[in-house]
């Protein structure tokens, strides 16, 4: 009888086997005819057997209709919306993993249809089918049900946009007019409803099956399996809601956070702090979870690697930008043309095409994905931090329950919140770590591919220019020996230049100090000694724990050459206030020159004879020898200075300067009016230096002062 009754709706499902195209539409008249045929076939049977068979038929028939509606949703509705190409509509957010649900449902339907031919073994076949698909159904429905609330939120947002709402309704009218659906939620809710019906329909079959039937136990097991699936999905949704709740809290403004402070929250935070102190003091034992600790350690290591790589790539991009900003091939080089021509030709190609394209690809394929990956770390990091807070609450209330035997409803809810967060992290962190690691590996592969492509492009462009280079006949060994010899010679010349320059000007510092900074330097000097002082050469911003944010020119004192993890690229320094870490590459040894009492030097300059000009903290010059007929005093720039307005004038280090007025218009001696190369303007007085007198006929060597 089962075979006869089921023949009516087998025809209904014959069109569902195709995975590429949606099935043909089934009208309400067709469905009514099918149900009438089933009823007429079964009406002559006994009532218990009739109820039993109708329950089985209901399961198979409704599954066929469900698969049909899923195919309408995917192949008609979603496909139609994709053709509209509306970037404002998040189709992935709306439909989630509905494709996976369709695949599982089609396999379930195929198995249910096959069970019709099993005769007395049909019930065993149905029971086995549900138990085999239990894990897969739980996984796909868990994801869909977890995203369902977000899909409804998106629909609510779209409904408030007339244009988007019109496009969605036009899609429903065009593709599924026979359903009478007034909103897309009519289809989106189907998977959520269907998964909850499986245990009910299986239980109905169990109720209409005799307990003496050999398949009775298997049916009960199948019904229990589907009940467990629903329970697990509900638990997953509860954990996800907790996670979403605490993730949203991170976007609150400072005013909103302050508004949340009350007596209860302050008492709770105080209790947590007290518990934390007891952990550190060893008064109470901290709850350990080795499984979570291992997962967290791996996550934090991965997060640290991602952040470091992001910073390094950002620095690499900055250096590339700086490299592209210099174009020496556009300047006149003091070399033979036959030597410079190949270089200039190749450099022009690199600067105009290859490097700009490389930089653009690097930003698109490496840096932006790294930023996105770094952004995804925030959610787990917030949950891990919230878990630590909830763990302190859990320990306190667990201790109370052990002592008194009970806790309040609110305290139990807090304990359950910790258990939910902990369970969610333990189940999700392995997947997150694995996906993030694969993501990071893809980014690194992209970076290596870009580097390889860059090298190939440069070599390809350089092939035509290499043959014109003067050293092309040298072997690789001879060429690199020539390069090293040339660099050694340049290094010796630079060292000689430095020694000569040091005899003319005092030891330079990165940037002159203000009076306020002078006081701070004295405090550091008295506390740590002169050998420990360093000056910051570039602005630095803290991105890790205990990193300092320092300005260029600020003075710090060296404390230790590594951090607590042995990283020698982070020095511990004292900034005169907070202590913290800074990169040694941004520090330079600072030679402090004590501030002597103000001296004045008469500058012979036409009618200005007799005027006095303050000097700027430089060592006393020795008295000139007896053979000096006329002392010649020179004022020069000790440091390079770039004019920032029309009232100022730029200086090059070592450049000769004529002081016109030793003060500005307001009488401040911090700015001097000077004349440089025929141009007049103001410069900082502490950027100038008075050189020692020189014998007539002797000219001191002048070299450009190296820019800091």
Image: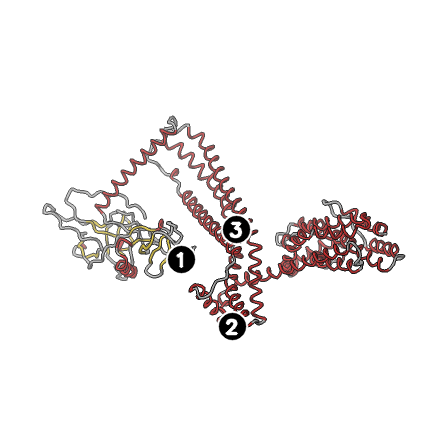
* Disc nearer the start of the sequence (2/3): 2
Residue 264: which disc?
2
Q: Which secondary structure, mark 3?
A: helix
Q: Position of residue 17 (x, y in %)?
A: 75, 45
Label 2 and label 3: CA atoms lie apart by 37 Å
Q: Say left or right for 622 vs 307.
A: left
Label 2 and label 1: CA atoms lie apart by 31 Å
Residue lying furthest bottom in this view? Answer: 263
Residue marked by disc 3 = 373
Q: Is residue 149 above or below residue 621?
A: below
* Disc nearer the start of the sequence (1/3): 3
Q: Is residue 483 above or below residue 631?
A: above
* Disc nearer the start of the sequence (2/1): 2
Residue 387: which disc?
none
Residue lying furthest left in this view? Answer: 626
Residue lying furthest right in this view? Answer: 44
- How crowded pointer 1 is (Cα within 10 Å; few <14, some 14-19, many 20+) is rated as some
Residue located 52% across and 66% down the image:
393
Q: Position of residue 20 (x, y in %)?
A: 72, 44
């Amino acid at each position: 009888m089962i075979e006869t009754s089921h023949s009516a709706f087998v025809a209904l499902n014959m069109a569902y086997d195709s995975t590429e195209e949606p099935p043909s539409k089934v009208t309400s008249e067709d469905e009514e005819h099918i149900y009438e045929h089933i009823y007429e076939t079964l009406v002559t049977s006994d009532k218990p057997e009739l109820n039993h068979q109708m329950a089985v038929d209901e399961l198979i028939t409704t599954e066929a209709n469900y698969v049909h509606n899923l195919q309408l949703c995917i192949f008609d509705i979603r496909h139609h919306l994709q053709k509209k190409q509306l970037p404002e509509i998040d189709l992935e957010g709306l439909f989630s993993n509905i494709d996976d649900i369709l695949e599982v449902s089609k396999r379930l339907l195929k198995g249910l249809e096959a069970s019709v031919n099993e005769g007395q073994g049909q019930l065993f076949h149905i029971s086995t089918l549900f138990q085999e698909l239990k894990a897969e159904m739980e996984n796909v429905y868990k994801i869909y049900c977890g995203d369902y609330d977000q899909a409804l939120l998106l629909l609510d947002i779209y409904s408030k946009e007339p244009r988007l709402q019109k496009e969605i309704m036009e899609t429903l009218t065009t593709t599924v007019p026979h359903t009478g659906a007034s909103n897309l939620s009519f289809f989106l809710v189907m998977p959520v409803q269907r998964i909850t019906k499986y245990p009910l329909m299986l239980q109905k079959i169990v109720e209409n099956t005799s307990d003496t039937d050999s398949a009775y136990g298997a049916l009960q097991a199948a019904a229990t399996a589907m009940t467990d699936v629903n329970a697990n999905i509900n638990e997953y949704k509860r954990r996800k809601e907790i996670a979403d709740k605490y993730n949203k809290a991170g976007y609150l403004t400072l005013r909103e956070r302050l508004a949340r402070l009350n007596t209860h929250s302050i008492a709770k935070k105080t209790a947590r702090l007290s518990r934390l102190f007891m952990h550190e003091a060893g008064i109470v034992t901290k709850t350990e979870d080795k499984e979570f600790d291992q997962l967290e350690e791996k996550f934090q290591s991965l997060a640290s690697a991602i952040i470091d790589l992001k910073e390094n790539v950002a620095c690499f991009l900055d250096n590339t930008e700086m490299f592209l900003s210099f174009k020496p091939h556009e300047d006149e080089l003091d070399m033979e043309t036959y030597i410079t021509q190949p270089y200039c030709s190749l450099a022009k190609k690199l600067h105009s095409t290859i490097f700009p394209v490389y930089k653009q690809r690097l930003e698109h394929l490496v840096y932006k994905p790294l930023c996105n990956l770094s952004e995804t770390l925030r959610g787990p990091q917030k949950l891990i931090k919230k878990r630590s807070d909830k763990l302190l609450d859990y320990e306190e209330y667990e201790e109370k329950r052990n002592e008194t035997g009970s806790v309040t409803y609110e305290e139990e809810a807090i304990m359950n919140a910790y258990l939910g967060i902990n369970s969610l992290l333990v189940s999700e962190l392995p997947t997150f770590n694995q996906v993030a690691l694969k993501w990071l590996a893809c980014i690194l592969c992209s970076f290596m591919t870009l580097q390889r492509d860059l090298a190939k492009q440069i070599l390809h462009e350089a092939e035509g220019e290499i043959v014109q280079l003067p050293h092309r006949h040298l072997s690789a060994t001879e060429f690199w020996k020539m390069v090293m010899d040339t660099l050694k010679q340049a290094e010796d010349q630079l060292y000689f230049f430095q020694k000569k320059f040091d005899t003319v000007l005092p030891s330079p510092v990165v940037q002159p100090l203000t009076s306020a900074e002078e006081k701070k330097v004295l405090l550091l000097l008295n506390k740590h000694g002169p050998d420990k002082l360093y000056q910051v050469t570039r602005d630095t911003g803290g991105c890790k724990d205990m990193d300092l944010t320092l300005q260029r020119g600020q003075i710090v004192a060296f404390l230790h050459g590594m951090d607590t993890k042995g990283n020698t690229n982070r020095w511990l320094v004292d900034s005169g206030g907070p202590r913290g870490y800074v990169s040694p590459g941004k520090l330079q040894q600072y030679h402090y020159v004590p501030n002597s009492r103000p001296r004045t030097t008469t500058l012979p300059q036409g009618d200005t004879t007799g005027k006095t000009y303050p000097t700027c903290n430089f060592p006393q010059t020795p008295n000139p020898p007896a053979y000096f007929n006329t002392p010649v005093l020179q004022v020069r720039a000790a440091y390079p200075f770039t004019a920032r307005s029309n009232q100022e004038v730029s200086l090059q280090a070592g450049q000769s300067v004529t002081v016109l007025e030793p003060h500005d218009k307001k009488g401040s001696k911090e700015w001097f009016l000077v004349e440089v190369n025929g141009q007049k303007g103001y410069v900082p007085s502490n950027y100038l230096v008075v050189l020692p007198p020189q014998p007539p006929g002797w000219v001191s060597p002048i070299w450009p002062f190296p820019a800091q």
